[in-house]
Amino acid sequence: MSKSLHARRLNMQAFAQEGVPLIETTLLQNMERLAQEAKALAPDSTVNWEARAELRPGSGADDDVWLHLVAKTAVPLTCQRCMGTVATPLEVDQWYRFVATEDIAMAEDDESEEDLLVMEPHFDLLTVLEDELLMALPLVPMHDECPVAPVLQVGEEALAAQAAEAGEKPNPFAVLAQLKK
Ligand SMILES: [Zn+2]
């Protein structure tokens, strides 16, 4: 069984009992939803991640399974100011506690600092990782400082050309005022 397949069908109970962390590198192209958000993703772009599980005494008779997930990558996104590519660092550092059912997760979610996951016999760790990376995406990706000045919109260019034809020096404030009408 390949390692990435292993991470998609993980026996969490055994993983926690063994206590041996999974330290992996996964191609971003294997995370379809995240790859769709990216702009011109390089085929060799990867996410480095580490998962470690442990057993802790819980409220029930059996120990609870806890999972710590840490990941680091950078995804090329479209800058919403200059429309260029902005390499956006993404980091995940999250604790989870496994519960038996969806109902318990719903009931305990508000009072828990950690995130709750429902135990499954073959747990898909990579999907949880992808969910976390998607949630870490900025709402409006943007360079701190754009490498090039923002290009004029078509409308602004036309107005500037009109003003130039009329023999006037285009006044950026006048252009703006016209645009606002
Ligand atoms: Zn930019």
Image (cartoon, helix red, strand yellow):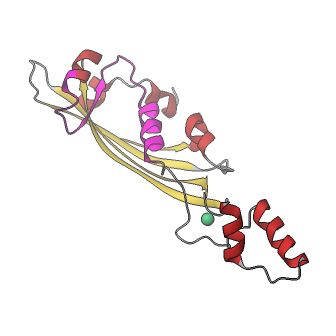
Report if residue 110 lies within the magenta region: yes
Q: Position of residue 17 (x, y in %)?
A: 23, 29
Q: Quadrant of ligand 1?
A: bottom right
Query: Going 91% across and 76% down the picture, which residue do you hit?
Result: 165
Q: State which quarter of the image contains the C terminus.
A: bottom right
> Is 97 placed above or below 35 here?
above
> Is 84 placed above or below 71 here?
below
Task: Report whether residue 21 is seen.
Answer: no
Q: Position of residue 174 (x, y in %)?
A: 70, 74
Q: Nearer the viewer, residue 159 or 153?
A: 159
Q: Nearer the viewer, residue 76 or 3?
A: 76
Q: Position of residue 1 (x, y in %)?
A: 51, 26
Q: As drawn, is 75 to the left or to the right of 8?
A: right
- What's the magenta region? 107-136
Task: Report whether residue 33 is seen.
Answer: yes
Give the farthest residue toward the right. 165
Q: As drawn, is 155 to the left or to the right of 94?
A: right
Report if residue 132 lies within the magenta region: yes
Q: Residue 78 lies in what quarter of the image?
A: bottom right
Query: Going 25% across and 16% down the picture, which residue do you hit?
Result: 103
Q: As drawn, is 66 to the left or to the right of 80?
A: left
Q: Residue 169 lies in what quarter of the image?
A: bottom right
Q: Residue 156 lies in what quarter of the image?
A: bottom right
Q: Position of residue 59 (x, y in %)?
A: 8, 24
Q: How many numbered discs, if any?
A: 0
Query: Going 39% across and 19% down the picture, which residue do you hit?
Result: 122
Q: Nearer the viewer, residue 57 or 92?
A: 92
Query: Going 30% across and 20% down the picture, which residue do you hit?
Result: 119
Give the farthest residue toward the front. 181
> Is 90 placed above or below 135 here?
below
